[in-house]
Amino acid sequence: MTRKGRRGVFIFSGLGLFSLAAALALTALSDSIIYFYSPTDLIAKKISEAQRVRVGGLVKKNSKFVESDGVTIRFIITDLENEVTVKYKGVLPDLFREGQGVVTEGQFDQIGIFIADKVLAKHDENYMPREVADSLRKSGVWKGPNLK
């Protein structure tokens, strides 16, 4: 085999191995690539207690409750099909409102309550995360502008 032929085999072999490694990595990380799960997605995925995830949706009206310690807040996130109860200890973002979009980050406890250590709220009147809007549009409830 000529020098040029060996170089071609080496390059194509390297590209093939790199492609295989990239495909395996993307397959393994496919669940981590998702920005957040809706409550309906969580039921379908059956997330374990130890797994950290982001949960997004709308804060259910009249669901916000401040516990007696004055720092712990409970509220419900809904995608208008299913709901997740969230417990958060800390100060909520100024833009946190019932009926508005929110994304929380944390993990579930033993009884199925989502213990959040981070809460992200919408940043202006017209904003709703694309995934939340798509989820609500798919359920046929939200008729807002097309965000694509």
Image (cartoon, rainbow, N blue to C red):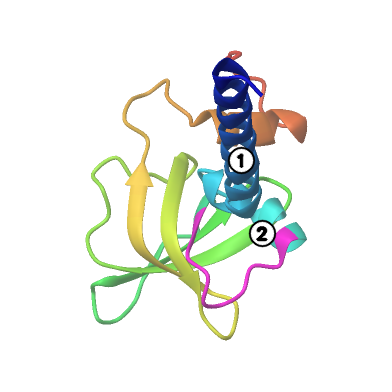
Q: Which residue is drawn at 67% across and 34% down?
A: 136
At label 1, the amino acid type is Leu
Q: Mark 1 sits on what residue?
A: 17
Label at residue 42: 2
| Residue 78 appearing in the image | no
Q: Quadrant of residue 57?
A: top right
| In the foreground, 140 or 31 | 31
Vertical comparison of 127 with 23: above or below: above
Q: How many labels does the image show?
A: 2
| Disc on the earlier residue, 1 or 2 | 1
Residue 84 place in picture, x, y as percent: 59, 62
| Residue 118 appearing in the image | yes
Vertical comparison of 9 with 116: above or below: above
Where does the magenta region start and end? Answer: 45-54
Q: Which residue is drawn at 61% across and 19% down?
A: 2
At label 2, the amino acid type is Leu
Residue 95 place in picture, x, y as percent: 29, 40
Vertical comparison of 70 with 16: above or below: below
Say few, some or many: other residues with alpha carbon within 10 Å of mark 2 (under 14 / 14 to 19 / 20 or more).
some
**Residue 57 among those drawn in magenta:** no
Q: Is the magenta stretch mostly helix, strand or loop?
A: loop
Label at residue 8: none
Secondary structure type for disc 2: helix
Q: Residue at x 33, y 58 (%)?
A: 118
Q: Quadrant of residue 11?
A: top right
Q: Is residue 66 left or right of residue 110?
A: left
